[in-house]
Image (cartoon, coloured by chain):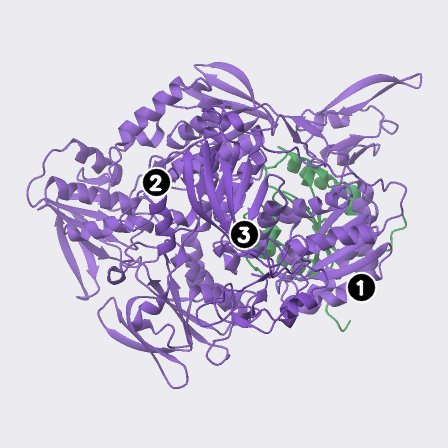
Chain colours: A green, B purple
Amino acid sequence: MSEEFEPKIVGFLCNWCSYAGADLAGTSRIQYPANIRVIRVMCSGAVDSVYVNRALIEGADAILIGGCHLGDCHYLNGNYKARRKMVLLKNILETLGMEPERIWVKWISASEGQKFADTVKEMVEETKRLGPNPFAKRWNV
Amino acid sequence: MSANKTIGAVAVIGGGIAGVQSALDLGDMGFKVYLIEKAPAIGGIMAMLDKTFPTNDCSMCILSPKLVDCSRHQNIEILTLAEMKGVEGEAGNFTVKVHQKARFIDIDICTSCGDCEAVCPIKLPSEFEQGLVMRKAAYKYYAQAIPNAYLIDKEGVPGYRGCIDCDACTKACKAGAIDHSQKARDIELNVGAVILALGTHPFDPSIKKEFGYGRFKNVITSLEFERILSASGPFEGEILRPGDMEHPKKIAWVQCVGSRDRNIDQEFCSSMCCMYTAKEAVIAKEHESDIEPTVFFIDVRSFGKDFDRYIERAKTEHGIRYVRSRISEIYEKDCGDLQLRYEDMEGDLHEETYDMVVLSIGLCMTKDRSKILSDLGLEVNDFGFAYSHQKDPVALVRPGIFMAGSFMEPQAIPESVMQASAASAQVASLLKDSKGSLVEPRPEYPERDVSSEEARIGVFLCHCGINIGSKVDIPSVVEYTKGLDNVVYATENLYTCSEDTQKKLVDIIQEEKLNRVIVAACTPRTHEPHFKKSLAEAGLNPHLLEMTNIREHCSWVHSDGALATEKAKELVSMTVAKSRLLEPIPALKIDVDQTAMVIGGGVAGMTAALSLADQGFKTLLVEREARLGGALNSIHYTVEGIEVQELLKDLSSRAEEHENIDLHIRSNVSNITGYVGNYTVNIMKDGKESEHTIGAIIVASGIKEHIPTSHGYGKDERIVTQLRIEDELSETSSLTEGETFVFIQCVESREGLRNYCSRTCCMGALKNALKIKELNPRAEVYIIYRDLMTYGFWERYYKQAREKGVVFMQYDIDRKPDVEIGEKLTVKVWEPMLQEEIEISADHLVLSTGMDPADGNPELAKQLKVPLNQDGYFLEAHVKLKPVDFSTRGVFLAGSCHAPKFIGESIYQAQAAAARAATILSSPTLEAEPNIAVVDVDMCSGCRTCISLCPYNAIESVTEVIEGVEVTHADINEGLCQGCGTCVAACPSGAIHQRGFRDDQILAMIKALGACSLGGGS
């Protein structure tokens, strides 16, 4: 391969913390790789496992689920539910032969623009190490 | 009309940010508002600024929605080119005389096309652009001006003639908006109250001859520099020096020009120059990284919330050079470069050459504003500004007339906004009987039924000046967008949020019969409501709007234009996919319990509760301690002579006796549930719990003094904190001659984990120093400080202290004073002039340690679901424009739980919070959260999974008979559901959908992304 592998990342960010954190990275002009595409959801607890699976099937190399810090959820405890769901999903994906490291669950507050940018940077590096999603467009669902 | 009937209308004089905020608050509360502005458009100085500190938000981006809201508000009437000529009558019933100049263009007909400007032959210097470029006699005040209309200048400006009546514009105007025969008019407005928000004037530095302003072209003012930085400014955001239009590399900022200057009778500090200087230097460096900024300063007054961290980033991350010095002279070299001569702290003289010099000018009182004050019979203070008392800062001596913003004192935006809301609260109390008497109900726009139509999507892509357009190739994104299915219209705008674009948007929706709209611009978190309003006006359900964020999430974070453009295209494609599936969402009304709760019974809490109670709202006031007053209990006197204990007695007895206040002392809020308009709170007292329902909450949990561990504190009783010395001094009637007091400022403050200024400690030290000098003029007092934070009018006490012989010594963070405990206390301080350490033998050492947030904040924040900043103070919704709101609707904050502040500041902030809460409590219903979850009864299996997961207990299981069959299904309470979507993700049958975030909509976004980039993996 002549070109370096550029991972595709899909981020599901909660409206109140992580999306606002990503906004703050913007207002603070903190630069990070352009590999991520963000889908805004109201709460990380609203991220259905189906969304994650669909994104992997469509070819995403890594997924970020961003929520408020545990205990800070705008909807009381949606992030706990997200965590529970994603642990389960990672187990299933691992059974099927996918690296669970492709799914990232991060708590990023509205004041953590730097953390958001750092997370994206880290994800890009780690995913480059993992290589392309082996199942991209190969699942017959 | 009976004598005691008040008029439900208000005249707000001045259309800057303060006037605009007052107008919006009062309009929302149900008063008729006349907003009177002298300039051809509202916006004031904030409209001229490029960015705002400490968040570097684009000033126009955050201001423009407020201006548009003003122009759209059905209760607000804007009168531009208008001046107040007098106020007669008394509180509750005034006649305000207004003189309005002719505009010569009919605002209602003008389409703002600019044809008149194109043909106009007359050129004059542009006031808005600070004279850096010329404008025509037929002109618009600025690009995003509200009202969005042109005008013709017939008067001209000194040295330049205005319109010559050539009539070219009349012929050019296709709309027929020009009327050269228009006459000035005199209007009389009948109002119940008046708010003066006339602002101040930027200082004219040409009288400071030594700086060469006006003589040397490359010496400019900071306001001129704001325009240079601005994308919509004279050089389109390119940094050029006016002398030769070259790119300057070395730029010097000179602070305190027109401030803290005895020679020109401008002895006060203008409060915001230190911060805007840092901001301008940082933004300049961001524009062009090879620029080398140097700031020449006396003190860095970073006294506000998060200011110290901003200054630190300016120094360390952006490499801004700071030189503590005094500039003696600037002279010009042949090439236009400038030679600066200055003296540093060691007393050495230096000369340096710069390509450009920016003078950080302060604000000053002008003759016309002084005349207004004297015409209205208002008292002035020693600086010529309106006299204001700390006990009720926004009130003037003449009842019924209030003030706000920099007309009151030079200051930054958040203070202006708070005072504006405070003035609104005062007006609302005064006119509570006539609220709603002069306003019409909100217009309801008929909604077009689009259910049977195929999606017709219109996409509006925003350049945001150069904020997006400089990185994202917008024209290519427009072309790309036009090729997407169902997109029938795609266009680009310089500012999609501006009023003219909004009008266009409405027209285009109607002309193109759009039934879905996409705005690709900034974050939906700020402007979405603004665009939704436009959809409603165009007859579309507002939820047929979708935004995509190509600024914060794209152009601002990806410097590679090609990658940013590709990302923008994909984001638009994803949004189009979602947009196709959008559906109208019906408006839901929720009932509002028109009572309030205030948490914390200190000065802010009591003031907020009293303001709400005076406005007629039942208010619960909850105080943890047995005594009201909070921090006031430990303050004995203030420097300007308020009897603090008298104030406390007055406030607490009024709070105890007010018929609308339900006081709970020795009580804690133990549980808060519900949502805006409908909160249920449990109050715990003596082990007993009572339940209350309320509509809005104000947090005023206060602050406490930091207890130090350094400088020998705790090891010797002569070493005390600021509050302790105040206790001692208040009990002392005389001091021994020659007793020596040393104050050390910024102890364990403005560094490390407590890297913030506590705002009040410099004045605390000055207050106590003056007290000592009063008790015995021969006592020796030393104040050892880092930067003396006597901002604004506090500067007068710095001068007084120097005159009384208080010795001030400055230290740097890397050379902190040392303390040795012996028979006397020995304080060792580095003296830069002498280049040696000197020893002061002291009897008393006072440590100014600053403030810590209240212990209960984390718990309270958790209960209320509102954020704290990294220092543990409550974090407001927006630093500049929403200083007392939380992002959670219905919850507000006031006083020092927001950040350390003075009594007067806490009072106006509390009144502001009361005004903001009143905008919610004033109406018996509110519009509910639209993005709630709904159950598809046919799909629901009745499994009850969702019920246990719902954090708001909004779901219950119901059994009903549908078409003869008994069905058990989940049922969601529309008032309780907050739209988190947890139940949607958990439903095993796919029977629950979240409005605005349906599964099919999200999956369509993912699929669209797959189609455009995820495609082949790598």
Which residue, given by chain and number where applicable, does mark 2 sit on?
Answer: B902
Q: CA distance from mark 1 to mark 2?
A: 55 Å
Q: Earlier in the sequence, mark 1 or mark 2?
A: 1
What amino acid is labelled 3 in the image? Answer: Thr
For disc 2, the chain is B
Where is residue B442, by image quadrant? top right
* Quadrant of the rendering where the C terminus of chain B is positioned: bottom right
Q: Secondary structure at mark 2?
A: loop
Name above or below for residue B819 compared with residue B586.
below
Q: Give the residue displayed 87% in from the left and 40% down from the top.
A: B451
Name above or below for residue B927 compared with residue B661.
below
Q: Earlier in the sequence, mark 1 or mark 3?
A: 3
Q: Earlier in the sequence, mark 2 or mark 3?
A: 3
Which residue, given by chain and number where applicable, does mark 3 sit on?
Answer: B80
**Left or right of B452 in this view: B906:** left
In percent of width and height, residue B64 lies at: 59, 52
Residue at the outermost right position = B964
**Left or right of B829 in this view: B975:** right
Front disc: 2 or 3: 3
Query: Tag count in the figure?
Result: 3
* Tag 1–tag 3 contact (CB < 8 Å): no
Q: CA distance from mark 1 to mark 3?
A: 42 Å
Q: CA distance from mark 2 to mark 3?
A: 36 Å
Name above or below for residue B305 compared with residue A124.
above
Marks 2 and 3 share the same chain: yes
Residue B13 circle label: none
Where is residue B733, by image quadrant? top left
What amino acid is labelled 1 in the image? Answer: Tyr
Mark 2 residue crowding within 10 angstroms, few (<14) / some (14–19) / many (20+): some
Residue B480 circle label: 1
Marks 1 and 2 share the same chain: yes
Residue at the outermost front position = B181
